[in-house]
Amino acid sequence: MSTEEISSTSSTSDPINDEILEAKKLYPSINVLSTSPSSISVSYNRGYNCVYITLTIPNEYPKHPLVVSIDKDTVVPSGLKKQLEKKLNEVAIEKSQQSSNSAYQQVAAVWGCLVSFLDTNLAFPIDFPCGSNSVKCQNHVRKALGKDARASIQSFQQSNSLHSYFAKAFGTVPVHEASQQKEKQQQASSANKHVEPLDPSPALEFLSHLGVSRHEVHSRVATALRAAIEDEIQRMPLPSTNSSNNGQHSRGSADEDHGHPLLRLLKSAWPFREVTELRPVLICLLKRLGDNTPVEMLRKLGAKKGDGLKELKHADLISQLGPHMQRLVWEADWDHQASTTDGNNRSEEEITLRGSTILADFIQPAVDQYVNDGALVQAAELAFVGGISERRLATKSRRMEAKDSDVTGGADETTSGTLASIGVGGKTSSKGGKDEPKTTTPSSAQSITSIKETVGRRPKLLGAVLDMLISEYATSGGGLGNIHSMTVAEKKKKLLMDGGSILGGATNLTCTLVSDILLSFGQLPRSYEALGILARLLDAAVQVGSISDNTLAQIQGCLRTLFRPTDSDLSQKPPVTPTKTTHDSSQPGGGGPGKKIKLSLKNIPTKMFPDHPIDDSEFERKLLQKVLKKAIALMKENDPQGLFLNPVTDAIAPGYSSIIKRPMCIRTIEEQMMESSYDSIEDFRDDTLLMFANCVKYNVGDAGQWFRVEAQRQKQLWKEKIYPEAKSKLSTEKSKRKAALKKAKANETTAAGSKKRKPPPPLAFAPGMKKSAVPTSEKKKDDAAINNLTAKDVDPLPPWRYKRRKKEVEIPSLQCLASMLLADPFVIRLLVDKIEKIVRADIMKNKSVPSGNALLPSLLQLLNIAKISTQLCAMKGKRLAIPDAGLKEILMEGEDRSLPYETLRNFLPLFSKLLLDVDLDKRIAFGGDLYDAAAQSLLAPSDVMDAEWNGASSLQDLRVIVEGALIHLMQPGNTNEVALQNQFPRFVNALDKLSDGNMIHEKPFFISLSHALLRYKTKLPHSTRDLVTNVMIKWLRLSKDSNESCLCSALHECFMRLLNEWASLGNAVLSRDLFLSLSEQAIAAADKQGDEQQSALFVSLWIKNDAQFALVKEQYLRMLTSTPEKTAESWKEKLGIPDEKADAMDTSS
C-alpha cells in the first residue's frame, strides 16, 4: 500500500494516520497491508525471511503502548520469533512512557526496531536456509544418506575413521569388521593377516608428529567416551521392579537381576569412584537407576568413616547425587539399622534421635532447635492463662516457609547445611554456610522447613522421623525432662510404672512438633489420613483458643478409627467385663458381660476429609467467618476513637451494668466470630445493632450528645455499606458453591456406571464392619463425614486393652502419635479449660452432678489418653489401652484402669463443692452480698476437711483441673484479699492430697502461678504474698525426693524467679531483707535442714557448678547482683559459700 493509498483509504484517526505516513517515509521497505481504528497490519521481507506483524491500538493511545504480535505465517526461526516479539513490545512500552499525549512516535519506533533486529540477527539464506531453500536442503540430505540414514552414518564412521585408515595402511583388519563378519576373519586367516588389536600407539605416534600432545588426545578421547557412555546409559531400559502397596518400588539386592547391563556397569564402575574422570559416569548411572538402585549399593553410599563418627565416607559423591538419591540413601540406612535392631543384635537406641543413623544426624539439630525455641518454650510452660485471647496461638507462623538464607539448605540443595555436620564439604557446623548470619534465638519455622526438606515426599522417611520422635518423647516428655537428677533408664522405668505428668509443658513440645510435621507434609499417605484429620482439628482449636462441642465429637471420630483393634487384636484378649457397675449397660460406653465392644462411628461417613463435606456446613461456617472477619475490620476502621472496641465497665461508665443488661462491643463480636458462635449473618446483625442501641440507651442528656451522634454515624455507615456488602458477598459465594457441588454430583453420577470400583475411604465403614453389613436404608441417607459429627454424637470410647500384632509394619504406631497430639501442651490447656467451664457454667448453675453431664466423661478420657501417651510411646505401641471414660468402674486383668471413674464419680463432686465454697467465701467477705449475714454469725466459712481428698493421689487429671482453678482464682479481680485467706488453704489441701505432697516438679503450674501474681504489679497484697511463699516453702520441705533433687527442682527455680521479679518492683512488694530471709528458708527446706543450719549440699552444688543446679544458681546470682556487695558477702558467709575473689587471689599468688 503506497503513501497516497494510505492517506486516501485509511479509516483511522488523523493523528495515527499521520504517524503511519511519517513512519512509511522513514522505512519504505515496510509494507502496510491494512489499517483500522484498532490495528495496523504490516509485513517486512528480507530474502527468504518474511515477517508479518499486527500492531493493536489501545483505547487511550498513546498513553497506553501498542501491543505487537507476530503472525503465524512469519518465516523466521522460532527462537528469534519469540525474541523479536518481546523486543518490539519493549520498544512500544518505552516510547509510551517517554512521549506526551500529542506525540505519536510508537509506530515508527516499532518499525525501526523490526528492520534493525532482522538485519542484525538473520544470516544469509545460504548460511541459514529458510522457506523454500530449506526444502532443497532436506532433499539433498535424504539423497546423500539413502534410505537407511543410520546405516549410512555408521558405515561412513567406520570406513573414514582414523583407525580404519591406519588398518588399510598397515594391511590389517579393523576389529569392528572382524567381529561383525566371520567371513572376513576367515579371509584374514587365509591371507596371513591378523586381527588388529586396539593398539593406539601408531595413532599417537602419528599425532605427535602433527604437534598434538598425548594429554590432549587422552582428554578428548576420555570426554568423548564418557559422553558416549552417559548417552548409552540414558537409553538403556531400567531393571524390572516390583511395586509395593504404598506405591514405592521395592529395591532388590545386587544379586537380583544381576545380568542387567546397568547393574553390571554399576558393579564395574564402583571401584573407580575416587577417580575424578570416571566419577561422572558413576553419578549418571546412579541417577538413572534411581529407585532401582540395589540396597547394598545405597548402604555403601551411606557408609560412615568409623563407628561413633558422623562423617560420611563418600560425602562428596552423595552431595552430587541430588535430593532424591540422598533420601534413598537415608532410607536404606534406616532400614538396615531398624532390621538389625529387630534382630536383637544392637540396642534400640540406634534408631532414635541419639542413634547412629544418618537420618538422626540430619533431624536431631532441627528437633533441638524447635524444642528450644524461646517463644515456643515460654508459651508451652504457661499451662493456665487468663482468657481466650491468651489461649489463642498463631500456629501457622510455626509452619511458614523459611527463606533459604534462614534455614540449613535450600530447595535445590536440600540438606547442604545438615550435610556439613556429617562431613560434606568439609564443614563441621550444622548452622549452614559460612555467610549465614548467626541467630541467637532458634526459630521453629526454620526447624520445620529443614525437616520438610530432608524428608521430602517420602512416606518411609516421614514414618522414620515420627518413630524417632516417639522414642524421644518416651524419654523426655511428660515433665520428666524437668527432673535432671534421673537417668534415662530411671525415667523409662518411672514411665512404665506411673506414667508421665499431664502438664508436661515445654517437655511436651515434641508432641507439638509431630503436629506441625503432619500439617506441613502436604498430602499425607492413606495410612495417615485419620491422623492428619485429628491434627487439623486440634490445630484449628488451638488457633481459636477453645474446643467446641462439635470439635469434641469429631476428635472422638478420629480416635475410634485410630484406636480400633484389628481382628487379631480382638482374638488376643477377651472383651472387658465390668466387676462393679454403677448403672445399666444402656449408658454410653457401657456393655454387658460377654458382649463384644464395637468401636464404630455413630454416623458412617462417606467422605474422608472435612474440606468437602456433603451437607456443606463446614464450608458455610468458614465462609461466614471469613465474611464477618472483613466486616469487623471495616467496623474497626470506622471507629477511630475506639468507642465500641472494648467492653464497657462500671469504672469507665458509672452504673453501666445496672442500665445495660446485655453489653456488647466489637471485641466480643470478634471473639464470637472466631469461636463460630454465629450460625447466620443475621445473628451478627442483631449483636451489632444491640451494640449501637446500648450506646444510645446509656448516653442520655446533653452529656451524651456526642456519643449518640457518633453512634448514629457509625450505625448509618454500617447499615448502608458494611452489612449489605457482607450479605451480598456471602450470598454470591454460596451460589457459586452450590453450583460447583451440583456439577460435582452430576459428574459422580456419570462416573457411577464405570466398571472400575474405587476402594472405600478408611472411615467409610465402622471398624470390623463389612460393607454388606451397612443397611440399605443407611446407604441411601446423606451420611455425615467426620467434620459433620455434632455435640449430640459425643460418646466416650469403650475401654479396651490389647497387644499389637507382632508383625512389624513400616509406619509407626498411629495410636502413639494420636496420644501425642492430645498431649500437646497447647491442647491440654484447652481440655482443662473446657472441663472447668462445664463445671462452673453447667454443673454449678444447674445444681447437677458431674456424671450426668454428656461431655465430661469424654473430656476426662481424652486427658487420660494424653497421660498414658508417654507409656504408649515407651512401649512403641506394642501394648495399647483405652482408659475408661468414668461411667463405670472396671478392673482389667487385675490392674486398676478406673482412674477416670474415680475422678468423675467420687472426686469431681468435691471439686464442685470446692468452687461453691470459694464463691461463698467471696460473698461473705467484706463487700460481698452476704457480709451482713456473716457479721451476725448466720454464715461462716466452711472448715478445711483433710479427709475428703484421701485416696486421690493417683488422679492426675483432677490435680490438673484443681491447679487450673487455683490459677483462675489468683488472677486479679477474681477474688479479694480477705476471702483468699480461706480459699487458698482449701486448694492447697486438695493439691497436697492429689499430689501426695510432691509438687516440686510441676513447673508449668508454678510458672502460671507466677504469671498470675505478677499481674498485680505493685498492688499485690502482702497477705497474698505470704500465703504463696509459705506454701511453696512447705512443698519444698514435704517433698519425698532426695535433697539434691529438691535443690535442683523446678519449684526451687520458680520460687527464686518469683522473688526476683517481686524484688525488681521495689520494697512495696518485697523488701530486700525479707528476700534474703526467704531464700535462706527455701534452701533449708529443700535440704531438710533447720533454719539456722548451713546446707553443705547446697554449697557443694554451688562450688562444682553442677549442670542440674545451673538454673537455680542463676536465680541466686541474680539476687546477689541486685544486693549491696557487703550484704551479699554476708549472706554467702552465713551459708558457707567461699568467697570467689579471695580464692582467685590465692590462686594467682
Image: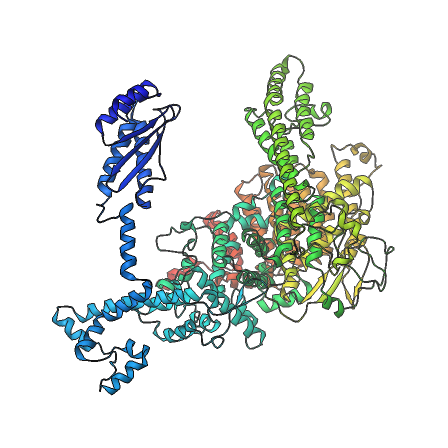
Residue at the farthest right position: 584
Where is the C terminus found, in terms of image quarters? bottom left
Q: How is the image coloured?
A: rainbow
Quadrant in the rendering for residue 269: bottom left
Q: Residue placed at 85% from the left, 54% from the top?
A: 586
User: Depth check: 293 or 626 in front?
Assistant: 293
The residue lying toward the viewer, choosing from 593 and 655, is 593
Specify the quadrant of the image occupied by residue 703: top right
Query: Can residue 1075 be seen here?
Result: no
Please state the horizontal and vertical placement of residue 1, each as a whole percent of the image.
28, 27
- Work out whether residue 567 or residue 206 is closer to the camera in this orientation and state it: 206
Q: Can residue 2 be spotted in the picture?
A: yes
Q: Is residue 839 left or right of 877 when viewed as pictured?
A: right
Q: Position of residue 960 (x, y in %)?
A: 69, 51
Q: In the rendered view, would you say 127 is above or below 425?
A: above
Horizontal placement of 152 versus 289: left or right? left
Place of residue 1122 in the rendered image (x, y in percent of width and height, measured from the top left): 48, 46
Query: Which of the two residues, 241 or 82, is positioned nearer the viewer here?
Result: 82
How many numbered discs? 0
Rendered position, 400 above or below 655: below
Residue at image position (32%, 27%) is 96
Q: Residue at x 60, y 30 (%)?
A: 729
Compared with residue 1139, is residue 108 higher up or lower down, i.e. above or below? above
Please state the horizontal and vertical placement of residue 91, each as a whole percent of the image: 30, 33
Judge from the rendering whether residue 249 lies leftward or rightward of residue 21; answer left or right.
right
Residue sticking out furthest to the top: 702
Residue drawn 20% across the image and 70% down it: 215
